[in-house]
Amino acid sequence: MNTTTCPPGSGEISPTTQRTIRRALTLLERQLREPGVAFTSSQAVRDWLRLQLATLEREVFMALFLDNQHRLIAHETLFTGTINHTQVHPREVIKAALKHNAAAIVLSHNHPSGYAEPGHADRLLTDHLKQTLKLVDICLLDHLVVGGMDIVSFAERGWL
């Protein structure tokens, strides 16, 4: 058996594919961090998040921290949960944003089920986080839900 590929249907990602994904993530992240390039095009963000979150078996909640020109400062996985739930604490989101001196933030989490449609709890949490971030002058630009290859944007839906 070739050591760089996995048997069909095994569900495993081959080492070669893992290296390719790591390279793609590095290139996308470098593009997102380019000096002078604002974080206004959502396609690179979507591609990067899809590579980061689409294949995870557990739900994770991630934040992208941006400066006042909407350039990426840092990204951080803030919470990891179960196959269908992550407990998010607004206090920790605020602490992380202040630690990175962020002026704006993009939130994202995955649905391991592959169904990207946000639930009622997702919408309530996002509203609460938006209000909480506003208290410390941090703008919530979007909350993206990744379900497999699909991504739902709260901003595009007019929910922010």
Image (cartoon, rainbow, N blue to C red):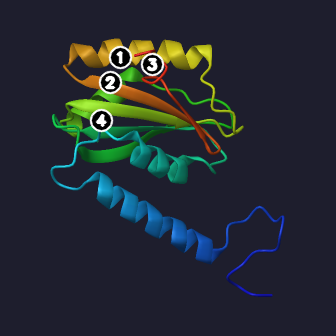
Whether 104 is drawn above or below 25: the answer is: above
Tag shown at residue 140:
2
Q: Which residue is mark 3?
A: 126
Pointer 4: residues within 10 angstroms few (<14), some, or many (20+)?
some
Instruction: Kindly check if marks 2 and 3 are in contact, taking CB atoms under 8 A apart as contact.
Output: yes
Would you identify the image quadrant in which residue 7 lies?
A: bottom right
Mark 3 lies on a secondary structure that is: helix
Would you identify the image quadrant in which residue 110 lies?
A: top right
Q: Which residue is mark 1?
A: 130
How much space separates mark 3 and mark 4, taking CA atoms? 16 Å
Q: Amino acid at mark 4?
A: Ala
Residue lying at 53% horizontally and 71% vertically, measured from the top left:
20
Expressed as whole percent of the image width and height from the top left, the position of residue 125 reads 48, 17
How much space separates mark 1 and mark 4, taking CA atoms? 15 Å
Instruction: Kindly check if marks 1 and 2 are in contact, taking CB atoms under 8 A apart as contact.
Output: yes
Relative to 129, is 38 on the left or the right?
A: left
Relative to 37, is 53 on the left or the right?
A: right
Q: Earlier in the sequence, mark 1 or mark 2?
A: 1
Instruction: Kindly check if marks 3 and 1 are in contact, taking CB atoms under 8 A apart as contact.
Output: yes
Q: Amino acid at mark 2?
A: Leu
Q: Earlier in the sequence, mark 3 or mark 4?
A: 4
Mark 1 lies on a secondary structure that is: helix
Q: Amino acid at mark 1?
A: Lys
Q: Which residue is mark 4?
A: 96
